[in-house]
Image (cartoon, rainbow, N blue to C red):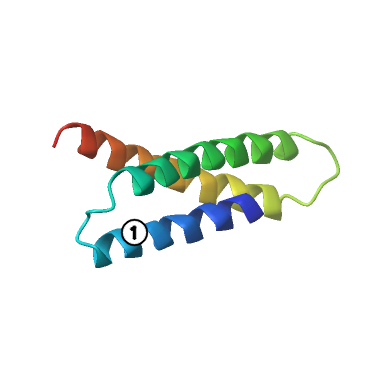
Amino acid sequence: MVIGLTVVIGFATISIISGLNNAKEGLVIGIVGILLFFLALFGFVLSYKELRKRDIYYRFPLIGIISNGLMLVILMIIYIIGLYQ
């Protein structure tokens, strides 16, 4: 859940920075975005592993899977759009 929140805040931050600078940040924003993608992937895997354990509260791993999975999809769509432009 913490990793998912970090990815969401990081994505919002790089989106705001890119928007304020008319998308001229280039390489730095791209590298941070890729790092956020891998962090979301790592958070998704950790949440999935926690969800498979016995005798746990399912609330936090489920929130982690949803937030990290959603960010994985959003970041993947952005990268695919970026490849074709």
> Which amino acid type is shown beneath numbered disc 1?
Ser
Camera sees residue 1: no
Residue at numbered disc 1? 15
Q: Nearer the viewer, residue 56 or 47?
A: 47
Give the answer, above or below, for where 72 lies relative to 18: above
- Image quadrant in which the C terminus is located: top left
Q: Nearer the viewer, residue 29 or 79?
A: 29
Tell whether 13 sits left or right of 68: left
How far across and down, in percent of the image, does residue 40 sit?
53, 42
Which residue is rendered at x = 65% and y = 55% of the image? 2
Which residue is rendered at x = 37% and y = 43% of the image? 75
Q: Nearer the viewer, residue 58 or 17?
A: 17
Which residue is rendered at x = 19% and y = 61% of the image? 22
How far across and down, in percent of the image, does residue 17 sit?
33, 63
- In this view, the residue farthest toward the right is 55
How far across and down, in percent of the image, does residue 74 sit?
36, 46
The number of numbered badges drawn on the structure is 1
Tell whether 36 sits left or right of 18: right
Q: Nearer the viewer, residue 38 or 64?
A: 38
Which residue is rendered at x = 28% and y = 53% of the image? 25
Tag 1, which secondary structure? helix
User: In which quarter of the view is residue 41 placed?
Assistant: top right
- In this view, the residue farthest toward the left is 85
How far across and down, in percent of the image, does residue 42 sit?
60, 36
Mark 1, other Cα within 10 Å: few <14 / some 14–19 / many ≥20: some
Tell whether 81 sits left or right of 14: left
Camera sees residue 21: yes
